[in-house]
Amino acid sequence: MPDIEENLARVKNQLADAAAKANRNPSEIELLVVSKTWPAETVQQVFDAGQTLFGENRVQEAIAKIPLLSSKLEWHLIGHLQKNKIRKALPLFDTLHSIDSLELAQQTNRIAGELGLFPKVYLEVNVAAEASKHGFTPVDLTNQIDELLNLERLQIEGLMAIPPFDPDPENTRPHFVSLRKFRDQLQTQTGVPLPKLSMGMSHDYPVAIEEGATIVRVGSAIFGPRKQKKATP
């Protein structure tokens, strides 16, 4: 078992170093620990080490895990949100990182109204136009941003992206730059602040921070190699 406390401290130090390199205040950058596939007792170790912000990919896994842990933990959904899971997801998660279409946003807004909730959300952008990835195209989001901002229940924090994996983080840097510039363009277009950028994972989060990330999603750098979960029917 990896030394989770030591790994967490190392990631926080690297986060601070990347912020300093970019002349940013480390307090502006949130560390979201991705706990997907890890059991509650392992998540508890990270919480005991001082971490309170966690991310899950699957609603069903979160339904089983979250009630076993302290209410002091804050949970973000970072995986794809299926429309039939919205009603189950909203009471569990403070923030949704993967609003990837106008239709999903509209349904989330409607159900949030029924539940009396005001979820924070990120708009997911498919920065590399990958057929295998969810997300708005920049053209669609440019055309639909006003409708999205008018959804009264959704608190739109900013943009999120999952660029193509590359073992060399420098090859991912242009995608982070692209997302930041696109965010800036939307702010100019709408006059509405979109202050947050959810980008960067275990292998490339320092580069993401250098390019403006305000929240990075880190799992394996803290937990070690991810446990594979058996598929369920």
Image (cartoon, grey):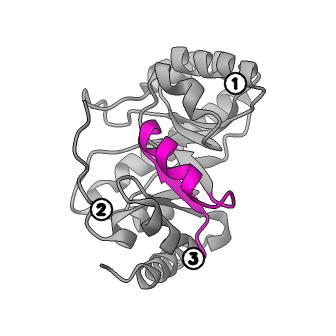
Decide: is 155 above or below 216. above
- Label 3 Cα crowd, 10 Å radius (few <14 / some 14-19 / many 20+): few
The amino acid at mark 1 is Ala
Decide: is 219 above or below 158. below
Secondary structure category for the residue under label 1: helix
Secondary structure category for the residue under label 2: helix
Q: CA distance from mark 3 to mark 2?
A: 31 Å
Observer able to see residue 65? yes
Return the mark for residue 169.
2
Secondary structure category for the residue under label 3: helix
Q: Which dot, 1 or 3, sits closer to the camera?
A: 3
Quadrant of residue 90 within the rendered picture: top right
Which of disc 2 and disc 1 is earlier in sequence?
1
Q: Which dot, 1 or 2, sits closer to the camera?
A: 1
Name the residue that disc number 1 marks.
112
Q: CA distance from mark 1 to mark 2?
A: 37 Å
Which of disc 2 and disc 3 is earlier in sequence?
3
Percent position (x, y) of residue 129?
31, 30
